[in-house]
Amino acid sequence: MPIRPANLATMSATIAGALAGMRAGDEPPRPVTVVFESGHRQVVEGGGCRTLESDQGGVVAIETQVATRYALFAGTSCQGGRAVASGSGSVSFGDPVLAGAIVLG
């Protein structure tokens, strides 16, 4: 088995955590709205890694109707990216979170 860097293991655990609870036959995650510093709102649907729109500033809130799990990543890819925030349900961040990608689960 190859040796994996610590950040890769952390990233994999974060993605797994965001996707935990989804079983075969489960409904896909409901859409969430990502709110940016600029006031722009991006609706993100489905599971897996999604790129966030650039040039809108940091993420200031995540809004959802149900407690959907999420993980925000510093880069525009979740592969090899660093998780900068994770949780479940709607949240407002005191300080904007600089993120380029999100995983829903």
Image (cartoon, rainbow, N blue to C red):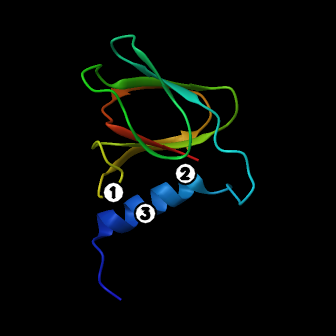
Question: What is the number of the mark on residue 18?
Answer: 2
| Residue 48 horizontal side relative to residue 25, left or right | left
Q: Residues within 10 Å of mark 3 (few under 14, many from 20)?
A: some
**Quadrant of the rendered structure where residue 5 is?**
bottom left
Q: Is residue 18 above or below residue 39?
A: below
Whether tag 1 and tag 3 are in contact, CB under 8 A, the answer is no
In the rendering, at what x and y percent does residue 9 appear? 38, 68
Q: For the point 66% across and 44% down, which residue is it?
A: 28
Q: For the point 67% across and 55% down, which residue is it?
A: 22
Q: For the point 30% across and 52% down, which residue is it?
A: 81
In the rendering, at what x and y percent does residue 6 appear? 31, 69
Residue that mark 3 sits on: 12
| Residue 91 horizontal side relative to residue 75, left or right | right
Residue type at mark 1 is Gln
In the rendering, at what x and y percent does residue 51 appear? 36, 38
Residue type at mark 2 is Ala
Mark 1 vs mark 2, foreground winner is 1
Residue type at mark 3 is Ser
In the rendering, at what x and y percent does residue 16 appear? 53, 60
Question: What is the number of the mark on residue 79?
Answer: 1
Q: For the point 59% across and 31% down, which residue is it?
A: 31
The residue at the far right in this view is 25
Whether tag 1 and tag 2 are in contact, CB under 8 A, the answer is no
Q: Secondary structure at mark 1?
A: loop
Q: Secondary structure at mark 3?
A: helix
Which of disc 3 and disc 2 is earlier in sequence?
Answer: 3
Which of disc 3 and disc 1 is earlier in sequence?
Answer: 3
Q: Secondary structure at mark 2?
A: helix
Q: Residues within 10 Å of mark 1 (few under 14, many from 20)?
A: few
Distance of mark 2 from mark 3, alpha carbons?
10 Å
Distance of mark 1 from mark 2, alpha carbons?
14 Å
Distance of mark 1 from mark 3, alpha carbons?
8 Å
